Amino acid sequence: METRILKAMGHMPEDSEVMELASKIISNGGLCAIPTETVYGLAGNALDPEASRKIYEAKGRPSDNPLIVHISDINDLNKIAVDIPESAYLLAEKFWPGPLTMILKKGSSVPKETTGGLDTVAVRMPSNRIAAEFISACGGFIAAPSANASGRPSCTEAKHVKEDLNGKIPLIIDGGRVGIGLESTIIDLTGEIPCLLRPGYIDLKVLRNILGKVDTDPALSGKESDAPPKAPGMKYRHYAPKGDLKIVSGKTDRVVSYINEKTSEAETNDVKAAVLCCSENATLYKCSLVSPAGSIYNEEEIARNLFSILREFDLNDVKLIYSEEFYTPEIGMAIMNRLVKAAGNDIIKV
Ligand code: TXA
Ligand code: MG
C-alpha cells in the first residue's frame, strides 16, 4: 500500500480536500495517522470492530491493550459512556478539549474490540484543530492509539509515523510538530476515588485541586513487585529506543563523571554511545554525541523533545545511551515515567 503524506493547517479552506479524502478512508473502514496536541495518533472508526482490528495489526500491538476513543463534541460523551459521574463533567469543563483521557463505563455502542475486551472506555477530546476537524468529518468517534509501532517512542512529527507505518496505512496527515510531545494524562473515574493511571501534561496537583482526593495507580511507582498497571498498555516495555538506555541518578558532578567514564570506555571499544541531558550540562560531557533535551527550567521543552531525541539515537545507530534524570516540578512525573519505561527500569545510582 502506498502511504501518502498530506499537509493540513487546521480549519483552513486548503484542508478540505485532505479532510474529504480522510473521511472517505475512515468511512470505508481504513486508517489515517493524525496530529494531536500530545502525539500523533493512528485513527480508525471507534465503532467499527474491523477498524480496531486493523489498528492493532498496523501497530503490531497486543489486542488486550485498549484504544482511546476521541470525540470532538461533549454532547457525544453519553453516546459512548454510561453512568458518567459529575467529576467527568467537571474535568471536561476545565480541560477539554485538551490532553486529558478519562476512563468511564462503556456504552453498548462501543465494540469490545476497541476496548480490548474491557467494559470501560477511555475517552479524550483533543484540542489540536486538525484532530478536531478530522474527528467531526469522520463521524465523531475515532479510536486512536499513539501512531508509533508498538514498543517504540511515540511520534511527535509526521516523519516519525512514516518511519514506523510506511506501507501499512494509506494516509498520514502532517500537521507539523506537536505542541506537548507526551501522551495524555489518564484518569480512571469508574471507582469510588478517581485514580491517575498515566501521568501527563495535566499533573496530579492540578487534578487534586479540582477533584480533592485522587489516588495514583500503585504500578506507577515502578516497583516490579506491585500489581499490574490498571492501564493495560503501561505494562509493556514502551517508548524504547533500539540502543541500551540507562538512567544515571545522583549529584550532578558524580553523574557527569560516571557518564564520561562509561562513554569513553564504550568509544574506546568502538561502541557507539550517546548522552541525553539538560542543556545546562551539555558542555560537561565528552561523548561524541550529546543531545540536550532542553533547559532544566523549561520542562515543556524537555517533554516536547524527548521522543524525537530517542528516535534520533536509533537513526544514528547508537548502541549505548546514558541519560540524566529530569525531575522537574510539574510534568516531571510524566517525563520520568516515559524515560524509566524506555530504559526498562535500568537506573544506576551514583
Ligand atoms: O495522548 C494520547 O492519549 C494519544 C493521542 C493519540 O490521543 N493516544 C495514546 O493512546 O497515547 P495509546 O493507545 O498509545 O495509549 C492509551 C493507553 C494505554 O496504556 C491503554 O492501555 C490505556 O490507555 N487505556 C485505554 N483504554 C483503557 C481502559 N478502558 N482502561 C484502562 N486503560 C485504558
Ligand atoms: Mg502508545
Image (spheres, grey):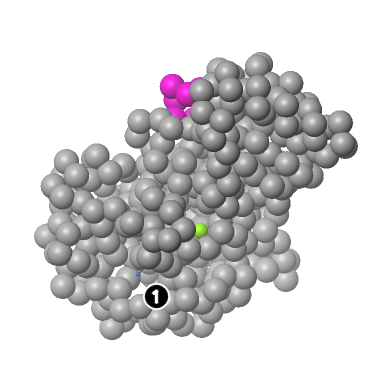
Q: Position of residue 153 (x, y in %)?
A: 59, 51
Give, as a three-letter code, the residue at label 1: Thr
Queried whether the magenta region covers residue 299, the answer comes back as yes
Name the residue beneath numbered marker 1: 115
Q: Position of residue 174 (x, y in %)?
A: 58, 49
Instruction: Write the residue at 62% across / 42% down.
Output: 246
Instruction: Write the residue at 54% across / 49% down.
Output: 345
The image quadrant where one finds the C terminus is top right
Instruction: Write the residue at 39% across / 75% down.
Output: 115
Disc 1 crowd, CA 10 A, few/some/many (<14, 14-19, 20+): many
> Does the residue tagged 1 have its C-beta within 8 Å of any atom of ligand 1?
yes
Q: Which stretch did the figure color magenta?
A: 293-302
Please give left or right for residue 197 compared with residue 299 in the image: left
Q: Quadrant of residue 79?
A: bottom left
- Residue nearest the observer in this picture, 57 or 96: 57
Q: Say if residue 302 shows up in the picture.
A: no
Q: Position of residue 99 (x, y in %)?
A: 36, 48
* Residue 62 vertical position relative to residue 319 in the rendered view, above or below: below
Please give left or right for residue 39 compared with residue 264 in the image: left
Q: Position of residue 295 (x, y in %)?
A: 51, 22
Dot 1 falls on a residue whose secondary structure is loop
